[in-house]
Each structure stands twice: as structure tokens, then as C-alpha cells.
Amino acid sequence: MLLHRALRLPSFSIEAGAASVVAFVGGGGKSSAAFRLAAEVATLGHRAIVAPTTRIAAFQTSWAPAFVEVIGSAIPWDALEQALAQHGYCLLGGPVAGDRRLGLEAAQVDLLAQRSASLGVAVIAVEADGSKMRPIKAPAAHEPVLPDATTHLAPVVGMDAVGAALDERSVHRPQHVREVLGLPADATPLLTPSMAARLLCSPNGGAKGLRPHMRFTPILNKVDAPLRLAYARLIAALLAGQGVSALATRVGDSAHEPVVERWGQAAVVVLAAGGGARMQKAKQLIVVDDAPMLVRAVRTALQAAVGPVWVVTGAEVEAVQAALAPWRNTVTLVHNPDWQAGQATSVAAAVRNLPETVEAAIFMPVDQPFLDPLLLRRLYVAWRVGADLAAPQVGNEQRGAPALFDRRFWGELLTLEGDVGGRRVLSVHADEVALVPAEARWLMDVDTPEDLKRILRRPFVDQT
């Protein structure tokens, strides 16, 4: 997966030149991430600038195809335009001081952002603090140097720090890390995944300087071995539980795409609003093997454990609420007053109400009583490794539900009308749909009294 996509840089900014300003902080790969992002954007045919606000190693000048030096407060606009026109991206920085090259002032980056449209620049990648090549750090009082124009804040930690002692060999300014984590001043414990997650999200750590308008995405870098991937998954799972999305990356490995996995909340939305016209009664309340189909669906969604569970209600709302009373503290209900206009209105009701912390949604019909939680997990894993759409496959046949939709497709879901779910979106973007294996029995649905009789004659193996 490419870095610009995983960071959710707005597509309009890459197309129209309204720059996203991505600030990388922390340790363990900030420079590599900044240069990788800029090169990626240039490969797509757009322009980018690497503009550190901290000192970088002098040898890093060679990492970009062109370098434009800024002396004093004046930006050499003509030289910058020439470098961008010739190479697509460049490094902008100050003069050399010893073995380091000075960074820009935050105000200079803000000026670049203001002029990004006229420059045709889509992305400004900012390394906003230093770590002396250590995989982990906490900011000093003067750090990070964040431009006001920052749109994305991405704290970075190298997975080689996990399991290492919190000392000078692995940590830049370990005393700051100990302070953030509330450890004794002389403590040198091994860094655990829980510690790393806390450091990344602390307002005195990776989230220092975060403002409401900024997108916050921790980067778990150097995922180049199975153990490091395991550490990254542990940290990412802890962050996702807090509603924080994260990326497991190997930004310094040019032989592979930079993002190995993305992590975040995927809501499971149980569509339970219909009146059951063909069944002649509300299907969600029909009992299959001693439990209403609604209860079976909620149990399945909770057992999948991929994220928060939402239920869209409509017909027989009071009876539905009563059936879900045992889960009132674990399931979110959203009522669709327009349920009679078709399933599209229930999809829209969910999309409009899901919080910003939810990155993808799995829409699950209430009338598949034998659905296995494993299928929902497979859909989520497909998203985690890069699929923005995912649907089940039985044999060589793609099925339409349950299906996963990344947030970038939610706008299209809102345009649906009538008694249709997301199948139309899956059809329009068929080349982007990841298919995951499913058993035919899992997807048996109940639309008519005859369907119900047929299903009740089949043996059922309880999934709990």
C-alpha cells in the first residue's frame, strides 16, 4: 500500500495542488518517510517538497533529486520552481552547519503552503524534530516545530525499539521518555508495546502540538521481520481500541510498498430496519434456533471483534430495542425513520452517524442467521492489507453481503436509492473488490416463508 493513500491525503489536494502538509515527528524513520512520500507523489505526476523544520544530516541532501538552499528568510522561488518542474519534488533546507543542515522556520513552510496552488505542489513533507538516528524519542520543550499549516501529524517509532532498554543506545533523550511514561528517573525497563502506544498518543509525546484540524496517524516503522510485525500489530491493536488509526510500515525499503498494514476501527453495521414485505412480518424478530435473527446477527458481529457494532432500526423499533436490551452498553442503535423507502436509506443513516474514528464499515444483513464471525474478520483483514472494498466469494461467485466499504466510498453509498445496499458500488468498482472465501451456508438468507422453512429443516451447528 502506498503511503499517501494510507495517510488519507485528500485526493483533491493531489489533483488541484492545495497542499497537504504532513509533519513527521519522533524517531525511527522520519526522514525516510518524508522523502518516500514526496517521491511517491512525484511518481504519480504531481509535485512535492521535503521541507524539514529541524536539522537533518548533511548527507541527506543526496536523498532528493534536487536541493534548493534557503539562506535567511527569503525563499528562492525561481530556483524552487525550476527544481520542481525538472524533478517533480525537491528538498528545501538551510545551509550546512558542521555535519548537519539547518531546517526551515515554521513560518517559511506556512508560506510554501500558501503558495502551493501557484507552485502546483500537492504535498509538503516536514520532518519536525530530530532524534539523532534513534528509533524512539519524546519531544523536548522546543519540539516539535510544527507549521500552522500542518494538516497531518504522524509520530514515528521504530519497531527495533520494542524490547530494548530505555537508555541512550535506543532512545534520544531517554529522560523525556521516562517522564512521559511516568517512570522513575533512573528506570531503564525494556520498552513494551503498551509503553510505545502510550508514548505515541501522549500530549507530551507523539501527540504534542496536535490540533483539532490535524489528522493524527502514528507510524510503526521498520516492520521488516516477523517479530517486528507482531510488535506493530500489538501496538496498533491498542491504538485502534482508543479510536486511533496507525500504519505498520517499512518506509526505508525501496523494494516494497511502504505500508505493510493499516489499522483502525471497522464498524460492523447490522441492517435491521426492514418490514419484511415478502415475509409478511419483520424478519429481524423471527426466531431461528431459539434466538431472533437480530440477536444472532449482533452476537456474530460482537464475536468477530473487528470494531464497534451498530444496528440500524426501523420497523418494530420498540420490539427491536427490547430484544437488544442486554447489549445496550455494547451496541449503538441508530433509527432510520425512512426505512420504508428501502435499504439504501438504512445504509445512509449509518454512514451519516458513524464517528470520524471509524475507517471502514462492514454492512451486514440481519437475515443471514448462519453467518460466521470468521467471514467478518476476513473482510476486515482484507481492508487491513489494503483493500478498500471487500466481499465474500463462494466458489467462483462473488456475493454482495456482508461487504466492507472503506470511508472513501461512503460518499457513493449516500447516493444510493431504493431497496438496494452496496452491491451497486461493488459493481461499479469491481476491479477494486477483494474477494474473501466464504461457505454457501454462511450466506443463506431468509426472504420468504419458504426460505424460513427450508433453513429450519437444515441442521445447525452453534458458532458460540
Image: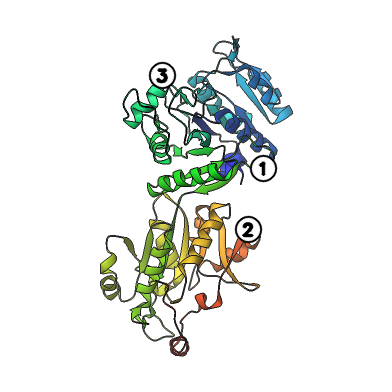
The label nearer to you, 1 versus 2, is: 1
Q: Position of residue 15 (x, y in %)?
A: 62, 41
Front one among 66 and 187:
187
Q: Is residue 190 left or right of residue 71?
A: left
Amino acid, disc 3: His
Instruction: Determine whether the residue tagged by mark 1 lies in a helix, strand or loop.
Output: loop
Residue in the picture at 47% in, 38% down: 218
Residue type for callout 2:
Glu
Q: Is residue 358 above or below residue 50?
A: below
Q: Position of residue 179 (x, y in %)?
A: 34, 26
The residue where tag 3 is placed is 142
Residue at 63% of width from left, 19% of height from top?
77
User: Residue 142 versus residue 174: which sits nearer the camera?
Assistant: 174
Residue 76 in picture, x, y percent from top left: 63, 16
Question: Looking at numbered disc 1 in the image, what kind of residue is underneath it?
Answer: His
Q: CA distance from mark 3 to mark 2?
A: 45 Å
Q: How is the image coloured?
A: rainbow
The residue at which mark 2 appears reads as: 432
Residue 43 lies, with reference to residue 68, above or below; the image says below
Q: Which mark is on residue 256? A: 1
- How far apart are labels 3 and 1 at the CA level? 35 Å
Total label count? 3
Q: Nearer the viewer, mark 3 or mark 2?
A: 3
Which of the two labelled residues, at mark 1 and mark 2, occupies the earlier sequence position? 1
Work out how far the residue at label 1 is from the one at label 2, CA to CA, in angstroms. Answer: 20 Å
* Number of residues whose C-alpha sits closer than 10 Å to that of mark 2, classed few (under 14), some (14–19) or many (20 or more): few
Q: Position of residue 72 (x, y in %)?
A: 56, 10
